[in-house]
Amino acid sequence: MNYVELVTKLREAFPAPTLDQRQDAWLVQTINQAINDTTKLKNQSPILTVRTPRNYAEARQARMAVDANVDLPQITARLTEYLEGLTIWGHPLTQENVVPPPTIPGIVASLLCTVYNPNLVWDQYSKKVAQAEIEMTAMMADLMGFDPEIATGIFTFGGTGTVFYGIKAGLEKALPGSNRSGVRAGEVVILAGERSHFCSSNAAEWLGIGTDNLWKIPSNDRHETDVDAYEKILRAALDQGKKVAAIVATMGTTDHFAIDDLAKIVAIRDSLAAEYGLHYKPHIHADAVIGWAWSVFNDYFGPEQDADPLGFQDDDEETYRTLVMASRRISKLKLADSVGIDFHKTGFTPYLSSMVMFRNLREADGRVRDDLGRLHHDPSVMPYLFQFGEYKPGEYTMETTRPGTGIMMAMANMMLFGKRGMQALLGYLVSQRLRLKTRLDNDAHVTVLNPHNPGTVNLFRTYPNGVETPIIDNERHDPAFRDRLMYYNGYNLAVEKYIHERAMAGEGVVLSKTNEYSGTTYEDPVFKIHLPIVALKSYMLSPFIDKSHVDLVYRTVKDARKVVTADMIRQVLEDRMNDLKAQAEARRGTPVDFDAAAEAKRICESQAEATAK
């Protein structure tokens, strides 16, 4: 077969560029077959068929075939195999992390963009999908309290991308011209809470600011940024003559769903900027990639609205109070200079759908201070783009190519939910989280670690029989508790490992853990760090969760406690100590004289003796 004949065959694998009933039907049939093949993998467990071990060594032997293969059903069948073992995020027993089930409209929006492939570099390549990005910007601006007429927004490559944009805009404010001249070592700092997402560290690294110049602010007992400590650290930075590229406030931490007091953070920034006579106000980026969704309650509790139209208060007073608490903090997003939004978290879209919003301000003379516009590139380096058209985000975005999928998936779900739908769904999930919290609170062997959070996540620790709880304050603050803390870390890791292994076999519940819900307030003499405290995690985002699933989660944890053995605890504790040793060696640059196996054995034996007494 010569190349012309082969290309003729390959045309069958492309969607028809013009109306062609046969080829159009073939596209639909192929997609339908792939979905049907995947659906056959489902059963009653939260895993697509049975999870089998991955063979990465074999994967490295893969090579591109010589011959073309236009047998599309065969290709889709092979592709389906790669989905085997995936977690089903919509399953009510999947409570692993902040990963939602995608909606049907969101899936359709993704598919449409995949077929027609709009590129948001420029409206010439995206047409009305570019208009959809502007519509989403106006919609989100109005939702959060920005002025929709002057706010700007773009979809980007994830929550990390939203933080990149916020810090980059702030850097140009603090150090005008740094886009061209760069940054000198130690000249600029970023401030972020110690419980903020690690993407702030990534941004500091990739923007050339350096992770040494990311100054972390301690948290309070609710895991929010401590505003008194923040003021001291911001003042210290200004006293040293540092330029502050950005202050990152977290509006819903990944583990705890702690919401920073943004109003106080902004007020302190404004006060110190005036006191020090700064030529700029340090940029405040609100990392609200999880918490943004609670903005739908901004006008729900207002005096001009009908009293609780969805009936939260009648059904569950605690759910109502929790939603009010969240709304009071999230309503302050309007004070931030920029806000990060992940629709693929609490907006229930498929990956990837993230947006960064810039509030912008109107100056006294009527001009708009366009923070996103500070990032404009030199147009002379782009001679093959932007010759015409009105919307040209590629002139200032980090990316050149941006797909339309994120925009259209978000738009689809905003059409689907409206405010009432989002309010109902979030309120329902909060109510189920509170139901599990109540079950855990009533167990003497469990301590809920984020009891005041207004979100859909429970962090908790469980303890062996005979331990009088709560002891979390002792674990955090008392160096004499060091061995018990390490032992109970091992105990919780063993519980989680057992639950995880059952889940991966298609049995039970998919929960997760965090290796550091918090740290000790004292420094460990061996590792020279504040010891991390492990927690188990249930993150509820499935609309299919009900009381029976909540009860099963509780029973699963209770059953796991019965099967955990001393050997299981010793092994996971040894592994954890080896991790801490490796981290200590990486920080110091020198070996640490420490035998993890012997130490794990000593701790386990001493705690077993103490429990027996």
Image (spheres, rainbow, N blue to C red):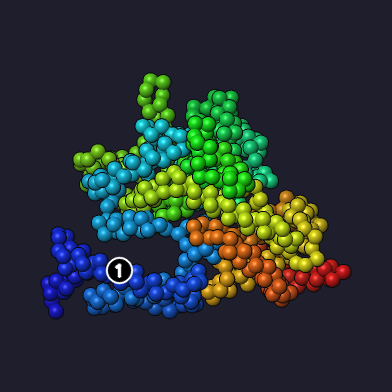
Q: Residue at x 39, y 78 (%)?
A: 61
Whether 408 is drawn above or below 552: the answer is above
Q: Amino acid at mark 1?
A: Asn
- Give the percent coordinates (x, y) of residue 229: 66, 38
- Give the percent coordinates (x, y) of residue 570: 71, 72
**Does the rendering let one see residue 540?**
yes
- Give the percent coordinates (x, y) of residue 32: 30, 68
For this orientation, the residue located farthest to the top is: 365
Q: Nearer the viewer, residue 104 or 119?
A: 104
Q: Residue at x 25, y 69 (%)?
A: 29
Whether 514 is drawn above or below 49: the answer is above
**Does the rendering let one see residue 211?**
no
- Give the percent coordinates (x, y) of residue 79: 35, 72
Q: Which of the image's four quarters has the N terminus?
A: bottom left
Whether 408 is drawn above or below 248: the answer is below
Instruction: Answer left or right for 468 relative to 297.
Output: right
